[in-house]
Amino acid sequence: MEKRYAFFPGCVLTKAAAEAQTAIRAVAGALEVELVEIPGWSCCGASHVQDVEPLAALVANARNLALAEQIGAPVLAACSTCALMLRQAKGALDSGRKDEINAFLQAGKLTYKGTAPVTMLLWELAKNVPALKARVTKPLNALKAAAFYGCHTIRPELVMGFEKPNNSDVRCRSSAKPVEAKAAAPSGQRLTRS
């Protein structure tokens, strides 16, 4: 796990789920990871704006990525939808749209270079379970936890690319690893409608 990230909190973590940001910062502190909030970040569009105005969505996320690159660290998102939007933008920019979009960014004296990878907190925790386990001070042995990781954590696979979803098991296996590191047991339960 990197020791420093350009942190993209996203709109939900700053308002409706502010408690999640508090928890994320506490986990980062316990792991001795510095989260540098991207100065001047803007909403990623949360998977809606690209349906109405795809160019605006790409420019907005290119701007966020260009701002993040100034920090000189990988971009870390906590929200799976924010990560999806940023990774889709990075994919488009790195696949030939960089010059076109940089023309828009020049108005704000920004340039997207393509130097910062985009990752998610869950992925970083799942890749670093031993470090996470080493920091557990209060094991949750008696707890069964049902993790909500967000559908974009593993889908679309070509954009997110961290974990290959299995058609017979749509659960995100990587979400179980950090839960198990806390000595809690993933419930394995699926929510069903009655």
Image (cartoon, rainbow, N blue to C red):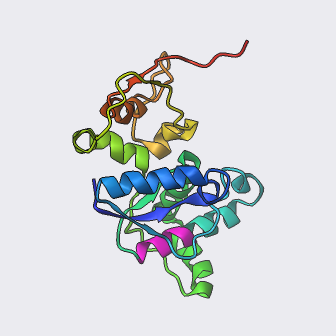
Residue drawn where x is 62% and y is 50% of the image: 17
Compared with 83, 107 (above or below) is below
Left or right: 89, with 45 as reference point? left
Furthest toward the right, the residue is 52
Q: Nearer the viewer, residue 133 or 66?
A: 133
Q: Nearer the viewer, residue 184 or 118?
A: 184
64 within the magenta span: yes
Residue 79: x and y in percent read 54, 49
Residue drawn where x is 45% and y is 52% of the image: 24
Residue drawn where x is 49% and y is 60% of the image: 90
Left or right: 43, with 189 as reference point? right
Residue 178: x and y in percent read 36, 36
Range covered by the magenta-colored residues: 63-70
Compared with 115, 13 (above or below) is above
10 within the magenta span: no
Furthest toward the top, the residue is 194
Q: Total of numbered circles in the picture?
A: 0
Compared with 176, 21 (above or below) is below
Residue 77: x and y in percent read 48, 55
Residue 46: x and y in percent read 66, 53
Report the quarter where the C terminus lies.
top right
Compared with 101, 27 (above or below) is above
Q: Nearer the viewer, residue 133 or 77?
A: 133
Magenta span: chief secondary structure: helix
